[in-house]
Amino acid sequence: MDRRNFFQSSALVSTGALIGCATPGVAQQKVKTPFEVPQVYIPVVGSDQMFPVRRIYCIGRNYAAHAREMGSDPNREPPFFFQKPTDAVQFVPAGTVADHPYPPLTKQYSYEAELVAALGKGGRNIPINQALQMVWGYTLGLDMTRRDLQDLMKNERKPWEIGKSFDMSAPMGALHKVDSIGHFTEGAIWLKVNGQIKQNSNLKNMIWSVAEQISKLSEACELFPGDIIYSGTPENVGPVVRGDVIEMHIDKLPNLSVKIV
Ligand code: MN
């Protein structure tokens, strides 16, 4: 490293510009910043605490019938994950119909109804039989997708980030603590558009359980408190247009509703 590069990198460290790498100790330091960047939180049911979101992971093709409709063989594929930006969270209070903006660039904006697990502990190489101990709470959420852009990028063998990772692409309800709600290994999951049933399955149809997802993901990335995982969607995903109302349900949780505007 020449002298000039050395000084540049020391300056970056001292202004805190390297914050954001996976070194939690660094983020605790008081540093001077030119502006504030808000932390994203999810409200917690029955508590005045808010859950701080660190990362949003999503598993792909985790129900066999959905994997088939996406054109892949559910029997041969190991689980794979992608991320949404943390600030893609749109919190939707129970009992409300939140306005959800139709995003730019797409002509095929699609819903995916999913169980969401939120972690209170992390680690690397977490064994399946210990993985559920990492879960702090659960909610339900929509993995909103610009399907046409995802497909276009898939066909061009480019990353499909633009189809999945964009503003407001992660509507979700308040978190329910595991202490009060327990874990989710089965139970109805459905989604309606304008009162008409579109997706209708059961959590037990997941190919990889929440415990298996945590275990597998922790082989690829060290997991930390604040990480949340979208656990995949059943078959019959489809598009919405402005004016449509989406309502989704998972047994034990209050329904989540948004109106596309
Ligand atoms: Mn999904």
Image (cartoon, rainbow, N blue to C red):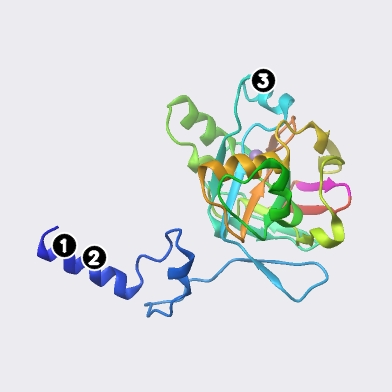
Dot 3 falls on a residue whose secondary structure is loop
The three-letter code of the residue at mark 2 reads Ser
Residue that badge 1 annotates: 5
The range drawn in magenta is 245-251
Instruction: Identify the image quadrant of residue 176.
Output: bottom right
Quadrant (top left, top right, bottom left, bottom right) of the N terminus: bottom left
Q: Specify the amino acid type for callout 1.
A: Asn
Q: Residue 9 carries which label?
A: 2
Q: Does the magenta stretch include residue 246?
A: yes
Q: In which quarter of the image is ligand 1?
A: top right
- Of callouts 2 and 3, which one flags the residue occurring earlier in the amino acid sequence? 2
Q: Which of 158 and 39 is in front in this view?
A: 39
Label pair 1/2, CB-CB below 8 angstroms: yes
Q: Could you tell whether 109 is left or right of 1 in the image? A: right
Mark-to-mark CA distance, 2 and 3: 47 Å
Query: Considering the numbered disc 1 on the image, is that residue within a helix, a strand or a loop?
Result: helix
Chain-order first, disc 1 or disc 3: 1
Placement of 92 over or under 141, stated as above or below? below
Q: Position of residue 97 (x, y in %)?
A: 78, 58
Q: Residue at x 70, y 34 (%)?
A: 208
Furthest-left residue in this view: 3
Q: Principal SS element in the magenta part?
A: strand
Q: In this view, does 42 lie to the left or right of 185?
A: left
Q: Quadrant of residue 14?
A: bottom left
- Work out whether 74 lies above or below 50: above
Asked if residue 105 shows in the view, the reply is no
Counting from the top left corner in percent of width and height, residue 237 is at 71, 33
The tag on residue 75 is 3
**254 in magenta:** no
